[in-house]
Image: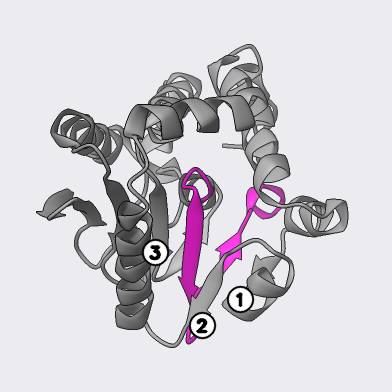
């Protein structure tokens, strides 16, 4: 489901295979297990790069898995809970984090990318897409809190959420959603690794970096921890 490689002080977490990397319990557990290893094996100054194989970075929650049971609501809540845990781990990780988005990132997959400190994207194909309106789901409030923290322009946030916009790398860069755009998947990963190396060279102390992130993104962290709005999934047609 995913692999973790360490190159010096840089960790590379890769969602493997050519599928859509749908965020079901199996994949989310695998990601969280890798993040635990990253936390345990971190050096004084480290960095994390997250990327994926194939056409998709992640196409969001595994709705088909949720619908394959009579307990649809419970399965949606479970995926929400597991993704919250993964995002919480990323937001408290004692190092800079970089998402190298090498394919489509939709809904919960988009949120996974935005949970990183930096987002790089390939420009030859793929898009960022909050698809909730198009699939009859109510967007979770904690997704919006993350969008507000990572996308500075209210107009851009409105475009992302209320237009269900499919942002290419060029548009995402113009709107300030991503840090940079690159010509191919390979170049996106290379740029992410170069950025990670530059950040490691800064010699920042990991736990100090994490504390500053917690202060800066305190509202997001509180939103991730607030599970009171999970009932919104029941208002959609699943």
Asked if labels 1 and 2 touch by Cβ distance under 8 angstroms, the answer is yes
- Residue at 16% from the left image edge and 33% from the top image edge: 37
- Residue at 33% from the left image edge and 70% from the top image edge: 194
Which residue does the numbered mark 1 point to in the structure image? 168
**Under tag 2, what secondary structure?**
loop
Q: Which numbered disc, 3 or 1, marks the residue closer to the eye?
A: 3
Q: How is the image coloured?
A: one colour
Q: Residue furthest top?
A: 228
Which residue does the numbered mark 2 point to in the structure image? 123
194 or 56: nearer the viewer: 194
What range of the chain is rendered magenta?
A: 114-136
Residue 126, percent from left and from top: 49, 75
**Under tag 1, what secondary structure?**
loop
Residue 185, percent from left and from top: 35, 78
Q: Which quadrant of the figure contains the C terminus?
A: top right
Q: Is residue 170 above or below residue 96?
A: below
Residue 94, by quadrant, is top left
Q: Is residue 127 above or below residue 47?
A: below
Which residue does the numbered mark 3 point to in the structure image? 100
**Under tag 3, what secondary structure?**
strand
């Amino acid at each position: 489901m995913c692999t973790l490689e360490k190159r010096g002080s840089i960790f590379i977490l890769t969602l493997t295979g050519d599928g859509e990397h749908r965020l079901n319990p199996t994949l989310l557990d695998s990601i969280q297990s890798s993040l635990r290893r990253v936390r345990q094996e971190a050096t004084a100054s480290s960095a994390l790069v997250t990327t994926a194989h194939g056409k998709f970075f992640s196409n969001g929650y595994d709705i088909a898995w949720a619908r394959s049971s009579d307990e649809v609501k419970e399965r949606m809540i479970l995926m929400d809970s597991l993704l919250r845990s993964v995002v919480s781990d990323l937001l408290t990780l004692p190092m800079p984090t970089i998402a190298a988005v090498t394919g489509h990132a939709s809904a919960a997959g988009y949120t996974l990318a935005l949970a990183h400190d930096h987002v790089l994207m390939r420009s030859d194909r793929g898009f960022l897409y909050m698809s909730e309106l198009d699939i009859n789901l109510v967007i979770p409030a904690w997704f919006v809190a993350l969008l507000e923290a990572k996308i500075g322009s209210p107009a851009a946030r409105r475009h992302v959420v209320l237009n269900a916009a499919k942002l290419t790398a060029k548009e995402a860069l113009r709107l300030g959603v991503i840090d940079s755009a690159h010509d191919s998947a390979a170049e996106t990963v290379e740029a992410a690794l170069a950025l990670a190396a530059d950040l490691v060279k800064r010699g920042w102390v990991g736990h100090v970096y994490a504390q500053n992130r917690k202060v800066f993104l305190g509202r997001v962290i509180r939103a991730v921890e607030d599970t009171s709005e999970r009932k919104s999934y029941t208002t959609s047609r699943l």
